[in-house]
Amino acid sequence: MHMHVGGVAILDPADRPGGVLRFEDLEHVITSRLHLVPRFRQKAVFVPWNVARPVWADDPDFDVEFHMRQAALPAPGGRKELAEFVQRVASRPLDRSKPLWEMYFIEGLQDGLIGLLTKVHHAVIDGISGIDIATVLLDFSPDPQIPVPPAWVPEEEPSRQSLFQDAVSEQLRNPVALVSGTVQAALRAPMRLAGGVGSALGGVRELIGMGAPPAGPFDGKVGPNRRFAMADSPVQRFKDIKNAAGGTVNDVVLATVAGALSKLLKARHEPTRGRTLRAMVPVSVRSEAEKMALGNRVSMIFADLPVGPIDPVNRLHRITEETKGLKDSMMAVGADAIMNLGTYAPPTLHALAARLVSRGRWFNLVVSNVPGPQVPMYVAGAKLLANYPVMPTAENVGLSIAVTSLAGTMGFGFTGDWDLMPDIDFLAASLEEAVDELAKAAGV
């Protein structure tokens, strides 16, 4: 399982001088801003025998030309050709001996557009890192800011011997401080968001009470190769549906995904009547005290999506009722407590814990909705038209669907296992049909 995330942005260089965006233009902007994101020039250094957590260290051999790459699509340069390029890149792991990111400048798109594919390991990406990437890439005007970067002198990379000695000596020299730090971290754990340990345990009970997910069409052993597809729709259309039929924009997203899944199952000649599929849906668990803080506080809920034959508005209402109940429950807090148990575990147990969690069958697919600014944005002076997320998959779950709403467009990215999702293009097309059907049923 490749644990990288990213997205493919579509850029229109029409407003640039001569209507052209060159690779050198993008490279100039990115290079001038790399000092704003130190992690992009650091690599993960592993402590011998895993006696402590890995550390970030400057890469003394950092070369931006390794990370920024040019590519071109074959004619006609449409969505199909772009998706095929993205899925090939998504099928390759990142080089762990270097900073964990890549960026592809993709020419040959129809109408003179440019594609920009980013690929970053999940170990680098969190809420603050997402803001950092936006700082490096995006402007709110067509005139990019080109700061004069300070000279960069990498710190000396720690040796394996020093990493090991520092880890062991710290644990031997100050075990009391380590225990104290763990206790303090536990006291600050997310379970406090719901009023203490009892609430978190209640959330865990709710998770367990859901039982095993139903058998799904994407259940199976996930291999290294990926398929990718895209779909999009105006943000305003989702808001209009929400205003007319009720619920939230995220409920509308889940309803259209459920409608698309229903079409896929029917095309596969699978039974659908009365059937549901369980989606893992990331949600915010930010407390009042954290509202203005940088970064994300994200947990998950599990929603059973009705994929049988049903009126689109009725499907939306069923999902709205379910998600409202889930938001009012302690499920997200329970899931957050489970996910953060590793924070307080010895590093030697992390790999085992991660494998146990990832190999469990908890859900049938992932559906993630990340809203962004709805104002015009630019990359190196080229206008951003849409961004389609590229997601990892779970070990036994062969489909992840994500949507990013930016600059007025909901961009859906479908990432699937090569063998489990041979019809991923059909699913993407079905999503756009499901949006049309729901809009018509809602009278918008």
Image: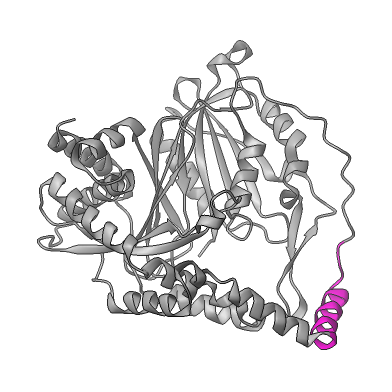
Residue 182 figure quarter: bottom right
Q: Start and end of the magenta stretch? A: 157-173
Q: Is residue 221 left or right of residue 44?
A: left
Quarter of the image where the C terminus is located:
top left
In the figure, 224 relative to 380: above or below? Answer: below
Query: Is residue 198 visible from the viewing direction of this image?
Result: yes
Residue at 44% across, 55% down: 226
Residue at 12% across, 62% down: 271
Q: Is residue 174 left or right of residue 216?
A: right
Query: Is residue 211 visible from the viewing direction of this image?
Result: no
Q: Please tell me which residue lies in front, 176 or 101.
A: 176
Q: Please tell me which residue lies in front, 186 or 378.
A: 186
Q: Is residue 171 left or right of residue 349?
A: right
In the figure, 133 relative to 199: above or below? Answer: above
The x, y position of residue 53, in whole percent, is: 70, 74
Q: Is residue 170 magenta?
A: yes
* Magenta stretch secondary structure, dominant: helix
Q: Please tell me which residue lies in front, 404 or 332.
A: 332
The x, y position of residue 197, in whole percent, is: 47, 79
Q: Is residue 178 magenta?
A: no
